[in-house]
Amino acid sequence: EKGSDYYIFKIKTGITIPEKEKAYIPLINEELDAIKTQYHSNTFAQPFPYQAIDFTNNTNFPLEVGPVTVFEDYPVGQAILEKTPVSSRRIISYALEDRISIKYSGKSVKYSETIYNVDTESKLIIERKFEFHENKIKLLNFIDEETSIIIDFRRADKKLQLIIEESSPEIVF
């Protein structure tokens, strides 16, 4: 049931938690639309990505902050979920993947470009300036199955475009 700012969960079987004890109680046991992937950020100290789940909350209620257990045929890891409203997408990482190595090679190359457009209604020339950063990343993959990887290349207040060169095993940002 939904209250004003809270949900009331009705469970089928009763549970007992001893006084002054804590317990995690699984309130939601539903499958989510999810894809297994790998996740890496340039803010990580190690060259290995994490095994991760990229999912959308397709339940009828928001998922609150707290621990989750990731299952395949058995539990494979645990993660902490941030608040996830209905229909929102999240990526949660749950285990280090040491069969993939990511190496950032070379220094970042910075360049800018200016594009001019004419607004036909106002008859004004609009100037847009874009700043690009190029970095090379080498991926070494020792997994025996097809996998995907999400690389989160963080820069304050900058938007980046991912370019994959088909003839090269490297990914260029």
Image (cartoon, rainbow, N blue to C red):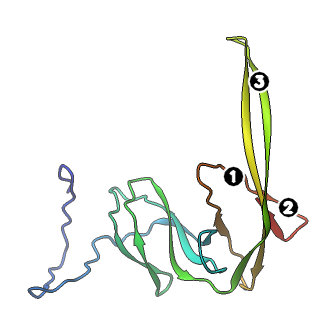
**What is the secondary structure assignment of the residue under circle 3?**
strand
Closer to us: mark 1 or mark 2? 1
**In the displayed structure, would residue 91 be above or below residue 134?**
below
Residue 99 is situated, as x and y percent measured from the top left of the image, at 68, 86
Q: Are marks 3 and 1 in contact (CB under 8 Å)?
A: no
N-terminal label among 3 and 1: 3
Q: Characterize the local packing of mark 2: few (<14), some (14-19) or many (20 or more) Cα atoms within 10 angstroms.
A: few
Amino acid on which the number 2 mark rests in the picture: Glu
**What is the secondary structure assignment of the residue under circle 2?**
loop
Using the image, tell me which numbered label, if any, was put on residue 104: none
| Quarter where residue 45 is shown | bottom right
Q: Which is more toward the observer, 137 or 10?
A: 137
Quadrant of the frame with the C terminus: bottom right
In the orientation shown, which residue stands out farthest toward the right? Answer: 167
Residue at image position (80%, 39%) is: 113
**Residue at the spot of label 2:** 165
Amino acid on which the number 3 mark rests in the picture: Asn
The span from disc 1 to disc 2 (Cα, nearest Å) is: 16 Å
**Residue at the spot of label 1:** 160
Amino acid on which the number 1 mark rests in the picture: Leu
**Residue at the spot of label 3:** 117
Residue 158 horizontal side relative to residue 113, left or right? left
Q: Characterize the local packing of mark 1: few (<14), some (14-19) or many (20 or more) Cα atoms within 10 angstroms.
A: some
